Image: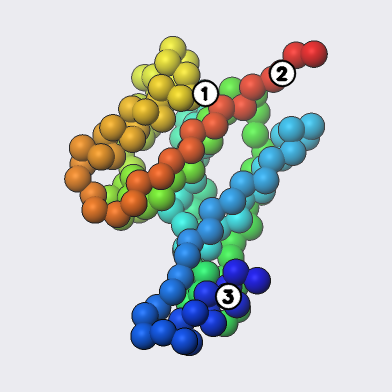
Amino acid sequence: MLNSFLQGRYASSAYECSATLDLMEFDALTGKATFYKCGAAPTYVYRKGNLFKLRSRTMPLGILGEIDARVIDFELDEGDVIVMMSDGVTGGKEECPYLFDLLRQNIDGAGAERTADLIMKYAKASGGEDDISLAVIQVKKVEG
């Protein structure tokens, strides 16, 4: 629906109209996460000192007539940290070299919210001109 809407806007204007899509669906009972990505920056999962990169080399919505999406299934464990961000956080580059160090050094002691603040501070200091948006989510077991 969104792809059709964006294509309609493009057809009626002189400017291209597109949007990236980066969506995570998480089943808390099974631990299964499904990521839907269209032209979005990579998603990172930090697990016990390892960093997994989930990426898609697809086009944003609104560019092509058919949706160019990638669906990625990933099993999450308690303690995993999911980092979803816009490409403004990385300055438009595919890699985010400082991310691993910030997660490794801060997530256990400072928690997800403070670690997100540190990532945002670093991204803003890097001087990118693109939008900067970020979600840092830590999987925790809820008792009760």
Labelled disc at residue 142: 2
**Residue plotted at (35% across, 46% down):** 132
Q: What residue occupies the far front of the structure in this picture? A: 12
Q: Which is in the foreground here, disc 3 or disc 2?
A: 3
Q: Is residue 132 above or below residue 11?
A: above
- Residue 80 position within the rendered picture, expressed as x and y whole percent measured from the top left: 57, 28
Q: Secondary structure at mark 2?
A: loop
Find out whether the residues at labels 1 and 2 contact each other: C-beta distance under 8 Å: no
Marks 1/2: CA–CA distance: 20 Å
Please state which amino acid type lies under the numbered disc 1: Lys
Labelled disc at residue 82: none
User: Badge 1: few (under 14), some or many (20 or more) residues near its Cα, within 10 Å?
Assistant: few
- Residue 21 position within the rendered picture, expressed as x and y whole percent measured from the top left: 53, 59
Q: Where does label 1 land, which residue?
A: 48
Q: Where does label 3 land, which residue?
A: 5
Image quadrant containing the C terminus:
top right
